[in-house]
Image (cartoon, grey):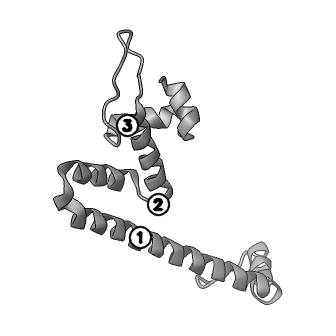
Amino acid sequence: MNIKKVSELTGVSADTIRYYERVGLIHPIQRTETGIRNFDEEDIRWINYARHMRHAGLSIESMTNYVSLFREGEHTIPQRKELIRQQMDELTEKIDALMNTRDRLAYKLANYEEHLQPIETSLREGEQVSQES
């Protein structure tokens, strides 16, 4: 099966599939005599697996490490679980930061007239703006 068909089948762009192969997320794809990639069912399973892990929030670097560990064998399960836990912790930190940002914006919106409008007026008049704004 060619890359266009695999891309349609998996929902992963051809460029992304090539990238996954280049960085080692999927093993090198067999090629025809003319150099065209010829995907089989195992290749499609790996592409789908990489897509699912990416959608779960794993970075490319973590996914590459994870796949390397997977290929080493079952004895790496604790390390693979730790990789996923680390990614979950990083995601939690990002969520917390986004929620903090959302809360600040909500405060500014709820207190626009008392908070932001005076700051905007002082900007027009060339005054210093406090860092807590």
The residue that label 1 is drawn on is: 88
* Position of residue 96 measured from the top left corner of the image (x, y, whole percent): 52, 78
Of the residues shown, which amino acid type is indicated by label 3? Glu
Q: In the depicted view, which residue is nearer to us: 118 or 37?
A: 37
Residue 79: name its quadrant.
bottom left
The residue that label 3 is drawn on is: 42
The residue that label 2 is drawn on is: 57
Q: In the depicted view, which residue is nearer to us: 78 or 105?
A: 78
Residue 112 vs 22, above or below: the answer is below
* Position of residue 119 measured from the top left corner of the image (x, y, whole percent): 74, 81
Give SS at disc 3.
helix
Q: How many marks?
A: 3
* Position of residue 42 measured from the top left corner of the image (x, y, whole percent): 37, 37
Give SS at disc 1.
helix
Q: Earlier in the sequence, mark 2 or mark 3?
A: 3
Q: CA distance from mark 3 to mark 1?
A: 28 Å
Q: Residue at x 39, y 9 (%)?
A: 34
Of the residues shown, which amino acid type is indicated by label 1? Met
Number of the label disc, if any, that sits on residue 120: none
Question: Which part of the image, by quadrant, shows the C terminus?
Answer: bottom right
- Left or right side of 102 for 58: left
- Left or right side of 114 for 71: left
Q: Earlier in the sequence, mark 3 or mark 1?
A: 3
Q: CA distance from mark 2 to mark 3?
A: 23 Å
Q: Earlier in the sequence, mark 1 or mark 2?
A: 2
Residue lying furthest front in this view? 41
- Left or right side of 17 for 113: right
Q: Residue at x 39, y 42 (%)?
A: 46
CA neighbours of label 3 inside 10 A, class few (<14), some (14 to 19), many (20+) = few
Say whether marks 1 and 2 touch (CB < 8 Å).
Answer: yes
Give SS at disc 2.
loop
CA neighbours of label 2 inside 10 A, class few (<14), some (14 to 19), many (20+) = some
